[in-house]
Image (cartoon, rainbow, N blue to C red):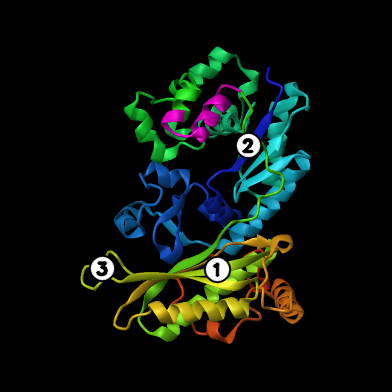
Amino acid sequence: MSDRSIALIDVNNFYVSCERVFNPKLEDKPVVVLSNNDGCAVARSNEAKALGVKMGQPWFQLKDLAKKHGIIAYSSNYALYADMSNRAMSILATFSPDHEVYSIDECFLDLTGFKAQHFICYGQHIRQQIKQWTGLPVCVGIGSTKTLAKLANHIAKKHSEFNGVFNLNAISPWQQDDWFSKIAVGEVWGIGRRLAPKLHEIGIYTVLDLKQASPSRMRSNFSIVMEKIIREINGTFCIELEEINPSRKQIISSRSFGIPVSCLASLKESVSLYISRAAEKLRRQQSYAGSVYITIRTSPFNEKEAYYANSLTIPLSTQTDDTVLLTKVALWGLRKIYRRGYKYQKVGVMLSDLASAHNRQFDLFNLVSVDTKSDNLMHVIDQINARMGRSAVKLGSEGFRQPWKMKQGNRSPSYTTNWNDLISAQ
């Protein structure tokens, strides 16, 4: 028995499950949730997977299949999903003092020191409480490392006989190897579709094959990350839990337009909106940006229209988190790279060279080290928007009608974040 016990809790088909919580009629129906502008399938119910719907498959390719089998498609409702995730993660935090929120639908718990004989019951308790309090179904995988916990969760999800909980620490090494011989190497955390073909070329097809590979040789052929993965599969704890998520090194905000955009005025609105979103995230993590990157492009798939793409990075003399200043810089960059006569499909912005308040670099010739007026203004705007809803206060340059905004024709109501969308009992 390993000294460490790590649990990975994963919400099943997260986006679809969120939709089903508030619309029980979707249970046992093939359901997909689409990406921005209703482009591709980014979440699928088990019923949709059984019909052959692939992750990332364009919706226009699925319309005939959807019509034949009654597949129900929803636009992404990010406000709903984020709120449901926060609720689930706050509950999971009560099950262990050491936890790491890994993604919107996954969380690691360190159960080391808990009574090992009760892990299956504890996992079932976690499942039942999450289901009762949020309506979301989860699976629990337990192993001696984070990588093994991920594999245990995969087994729990794929094999219904375990009722959603599987503990690799509770079985013998040869039983573990038997399971690993049946799991494709692409299912290993950190391998995925990109590295799996390269591993196939050297004869590694299953998790067991990877486990038996030489860590040092694989490090020289791939990277130190590959070495850590192999050692973790062999039970050596190499990847610690991150109780505090590290600050982002870059903040990106970009979207494809719902309709092609030609005029500079509409592009300015979109850039202003994306900079505002990025600046909010910047202040939330208490960072300051040292440069602004902006990019625009037309559709690379439209053979009837000329293709154009360009980008520009603008360094700042003083690092800032001021939305007004960042917007002015971004709009200046947009005017530099904009060309008339093109139908633009996508605009993106990125804030880089981020620094914390303690490491902020000031302008040598700027006698005012801290712009108190700017800081106070941003603080008030953030407070109002947090209380009254996003964009309650915004820059006029963001526009109001925004016909270019992404398509969300099949979006469900914001059941938990908008008073007007609350479900009422009849």
Residue found at the very far front of the displayed protein: 365
Residue type highlighted by circle 1: Ser
Q: Nearer the viewer, residue 161 or 403?
A: 403
Nearest to the eye among marks 1 and 2: give it.
Answer: 1
Specify few, some or many for label 1: CA neighbours under 10 Å numbering under 14, 14-19, or 20 or more. Answer: many
Left or right relative to 16: residue 93: right
Residue 145 lies in what quarter of the image? Answer: top right
| Helix, strand or loop status at disc 2 | strand
| Helix, strand or loop status at disc 3 | loop
Residue type highlighted by circle 3: Asn
Q: Nearer the viewer, residue 223 or 140?
A: 223
Mark 1 or mark 3: name the one nearer the start of the chain.
Answer: 1
Magenta residue span: 220-235
Nearest to the eye among marks 2 and 3: give it.
Answer: 3
Residue 49, above or below 32: above
Residue 83 lies in what quarter of the image? Answer: bottom right
User: Residue 203: x, y in percent?
Assistant: 35, 23
Residue contact at pointers 1 and 3, CB within 8 angstroms: no
C-alpha span from label 1 to label 2: 37 Å
C-alpha span from label 2 to label 3: 43 Å
Q: Which residue is mark 2?
A: 8
